[in-house]
Image: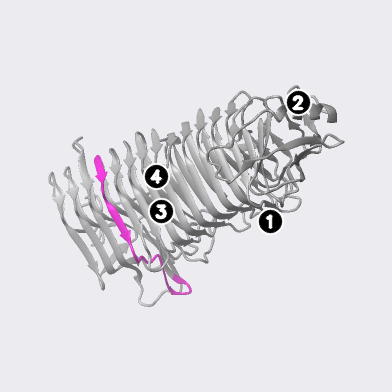
Amino acid sequence: MGVENTYTLPLNGAPYVLGAFGVDANANNNTVILNKGVKIDFHTTPYMQSALGDNIFDERMTHVIGAITYNGNAKNNKVVIDGASLLVHGPSGAYSTSAATHLGGAFVDVNNNQSYEVSSNKVLINDLKLDLRVDTKNTPLAYNAILVGEIFGGKIIQGNAYKNTIDIKDLQTLLALNTNVEVKALLDFYAGVTNNGVANDNSISVNLKKPFEINSNFTGKNEFNLYGGVATKGANRNSIHINGDLTQGITVENHQDKIQIIAAQTLSSKANNNSINIKNSNIAMPLYLYGVSKASIDNKDYYASSAYANSIVLDNVKSGRNLTAIIEADEVVKNTINYNMVQSLSNASNIDKGSKIILRANENANNNTLNIKDYSSAASSNVYVINAKNESANNTFIFDNLALGTASDKREGEIVISAGIAKNTHDNYTHINNLNIDEYKNNSTIIIAASGVYSKNDKSYNNTLYLSGDTNIFNNTDIEVLAGSFLQTKEDNNFVSKALMHKNGTNNHLVLNTSIKANTINNFDHFSFILKDSAKAYLSTKEVINLSKDSSINIYTNNNVKNKSIILMQSEKGFVDVNNKHLNQEDLQSLLNFLVKNNKSLHKNIKAKAQKVKYTLSVSNDAKSIVVNLN
């Protein structure tokens, strides 16, 4: 079975270890148990990669499966590995070999155009070890063996995959017999997979006694992929849970190294309520998290029609290379990403791809939430954005204790933060409490904006940016743009971010409870200041600040700040009106006297105990500063 009759093979040809096999029959309630002392040979099996990047193996690979059936259902089948060894069997006269395996709870093949179901199947890996056998009398002086494996809870060619699980507790991925003889495992895990159907309620749980070990190898990469649900017609309520360290702390780098964790991937239909949860984990490889991921086939991208209420939660996680979290679909709505005590620390090398959080919608991205607490990143690219082609609205970014730096030897890099980038972006809210930015030089780009657009004709309105706490920015490091809206364009498949020409009448709102400097501050109609004793000048910029009769300057205190004069706003190039005319001291004072009558209330999410105070506004002699005088 599994070997074409044109082959002439010894006994290692396509061995199957099965709990049950059926044709035109259901296969239910079968179990394969591999206990301590069991060794399964895996002979050399050539493979190549598909258009999806997946490994394709010939029929000679070894299969360990709870049940296989053709044209039937497979339910409640199980594979339990409790101390067994997977032994890579290498030929003599060589210094390296690779072998492959399929290991799964159940597999359903279909060739009659009907749909079946693979459900409630399990793979339990309590203790799985590696070993090596080479067809020589003596131990080879040097040998590099790799076991490439696909481990799945339930897999079906046509039909649906429901409630399949993988539970991993102890899995050896590197065995060093001596300095020059090693066996490695590069594994992909799929909880539930269908080539034509729906994958719902599948899960992977990882709670390792010892973290995965990796090393350099002849494939040029170390890669692990974990998938919750993979489908063509919808993937919902799939989950991946990781508790504890995933990979060892010190690793040899290959430029293709990565761990991909994908809760849901579907070619069409909905991908809702999927989740990734990682807790108390050190991860020493580039880490890519996808709550919902596109699929790329033959250079064409396929997206879920909606990504609704998906979540990515990280608690006490350290990524030793870079960390990227993505949710992408046609409609991206009410998704959440929560980080608590997370570090992303890249080294100063060209393999770094940055640390990013990106929610990306082909149509609309609305009502999504990022809640990031005690987060630090040292990467050449720090990007935290929500992008949508058409509308991005009512999104919320909250950063509490944010520390950003660059891994570049030249101290170059980019920071981009924006809760809504689209043709029509509105009612987005960003709050950054305690912002810390390390040294950036030369061609660095730092942009913090309440919203973003793709062209000057796009719309941005009713967005709020709130900065509070203590702001610490390295000397001579400049925030390029602090804005109600900025411009993002695509050039040569790269996104370019820069300042957007100021527009009046946007109703965008800047709220400050801290001091901040930036080269360009624009596209705000309203400025609110929650004053405290420690601040000297709240808002400083090199370029002009735009004010109009529709603007407002609102003063609050959260303590008893009285009888003081404080610089609110200062610009090296002064202030201009709605017609872009520079305002002298008299004209600016006249405008301020009008603006004190205007009022803009604080955003409903601002919980600071702030109260309005009596004040007057005055202008410096050079008309480059606005001062508040508290009564």
Q: Is residue 29 left or right of residue 516?
A: left
Name the residue that disc number 1 marks.
Answer: 409
Q: Position of residue 608 (x, y in %)?
A: 58, 46
Contact? badges 2 and 1 (CB < 8 Å): no
Residue count near mark 2 (Cα–Cα under 10 Å), binned few <14, some 14–19, many ≥20: some
Q: Earlier in the sequence, mark 1 or mark 4?
A: 4
Name the residue that disc number 3 marks.
Answer: 277
Mark 3 and mark 1: Cα distance apart in space = 33 Å
Q: Nearer the viewer, mark 3 or mark 2?
A: 2
Q: Position of residue 13 (x, y in %)?
A: 25, 58
Is the residue 548 above or below the residue 194 in the image?
A: above
Q: Earlier in the sequence, mark 4 or mark 2?
A: 4
Q: Nearer the viewer, mark 4 or mark 3?
A: 3
> What amino acid is labelled 3 in the image?
Asn
Q: Earlier in the sequence, mark 3 or mark 2?
A: 3
Q: Which mark is residue 489?
A: none
> What amino acid is labelled 2 in the image?
Asp
Name the residue that disc number 4 marks.
Answer: 50
Mark 2 and mark 1: Cα distance apart in space = 43 Å
Contact? badges 1 and 4 (CB < 8 Å): no
Identify the residue at horizontal 43%, vertical 56% (top origin).
Answer: 278
Q: What element does badge 2 sit on? A: loop
Name the residue that disc number 2 marks.
Answer: 577
Mark 1 and mark 4: Cα distance apart in space = 37 Å
Q: Position of residue 619 (x, y in %)?
A: 81, 35
Q: What element does badge 4 sit on? A: loop
Q: Is residue 196 visible?
A: yes
Is the residue 274 above or below the residue 142 in the image?
A: above
Q: How many marks?
A: 4
Start and end of the magenta stretch?
158-181
Is the residue 543 above or below the residue 83 in the image?
A: above
